Each structure stands twice: as C-alpha cells, then as structure tokens.
Amino acid sequence: MSDPRYAPRDCAVDYALFGKSDNLTWKSLEAVMAMYPNLADTETRAQALLLAAKLQHLYVLRIRQRLQVRRTPVKSFAADAGIGYDRMVKVLRGAAILRFEDLAMADVLIGEVSEFAVRDARQADIVIAKAELDATQRARDSEFALRTAMRETLAKAASDGAKNIGNR
C-alpha cells in the first residue's frame, strides 16, 4: 500500500480557510503524525510537513492578494504561468503542493510572493524613498542658501543705506 497523498490543507483545523484567512488554526504534531503515519513517522518529519503547509498557506495568501490588486483572474494567471487551471485551483486551496517553479512564476508574473521578491520590492521602495528624501533635502538646502543670500543682501543694503544717511 502506498503512502497517503499529502495535502497541505490537511494540516489546518478548518481546511476551507487554507489560503484565505490570516487566522488559520493548525493541527498538532500528533494529529499530523496520525494523519500521515508513513510520511510523518517522526516528530521532526511532522514538523516539516506542518511548516511546509504553513509556508504554502502564506504564499497562497500573497498570491491571492497580488491577483486581487492586479485584478487578474486565477484562470488568466494559470494560463500565463503555463499551469493547468485545475492544478492551480488545487494549489490555492491546499489540495496540491505548491512547487518552487510555481512560486518563482508567481514572482515573475505578479511579484511580491516569495521572500526574495518581497525583499526586493521593499529595497526598491527604500531606494525610491531615499532618493525622494535626498531630493527634498537638496531643495531645502537650496532654498535655505537662497534665503541666506537674500538676508545678507538685505543686511548689506540696510547697512549701506544707513551709511549713506549718516554721510549726509
């Protein structure tokens, strides 16, 4: 008899919330070990399966969010990714395992799914924010220099005017 098929959503208490809710409750290691006695035959392997399910849940949440932001239907995303729609739906609901290729394709097509893409987007945001801050500071410095020059010019004019009045 072959091992039972692993479905990440099986690790969730309410599997209908897999990939849809931030507040997902997870089954215990003992429950995972009982569900998959051949795959999770040790506590370490059960931890790994549970962690893999949690990671897929996180990535599915991000994929769904990015699809919503971009107003891209799942069917279009699956077609663009070269993934069958049926498989994509199974991955999103946790009935099938998300592969690295799926994750990388999501990063390429919709961005900000994996930690690499999220980090790169944050770094880009930081670079842009720093450039904007630097430009604002340069503008302030330039304005300050202009005001200082104007004050000095006015002070000199006032001083010269006072001298001229005193010489009369």
Image (cartoon, rainbow, N blue to C red):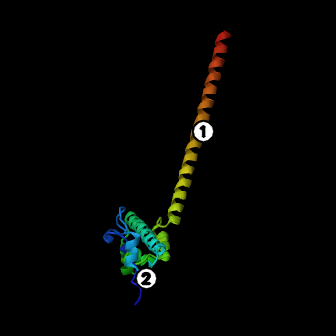
Q: Which residue is mark 2?
A: 38
Residue that appears at 37% across and 73% down = 31
Task: Identify the mark at residue 141; answer none if there is no mark.
Answer: 1
Q: In the rendered view, would you say 5 is above or below 93?
A: below
Q: Locate residue 22, reporting x and y percent.
A: 37, 62
Q: Is residue 123 left or right of residue 82?
A: right
Q: Locate residue 53, reporting x and y percent.
A: 42, 71
Q: Nearer the viewer, residue 28 or 142?
A: 28
Q: Locate residue 60, reporting x and y percent.
A: 40, 69
Q: In the rendered view, would you say 138 is above or below 146?
A: below
Quadrant of the snapshot with the N terminus? bottom left
Q: Locate residue 29, reporting x and y percent.
A: 41, 71
SS class, disc 1 = helix
Whether residue 8 is visible to the viewer of this picture, yes or no, is no
Q: Give the mark nearest the N terminus, 2 or 1.
A: 2
Name which quarter of the figure residue 17 lies in.
Answer: bottom left
Residue type, mark 1 in image:
Asp
SS class, disc 2 = loop
Q: Is residue 129 left or right of residue 60?
A: right
Quadrant of the snapshot with the C terminus? top right
Residue that appears at 48% across and 73% down = 44
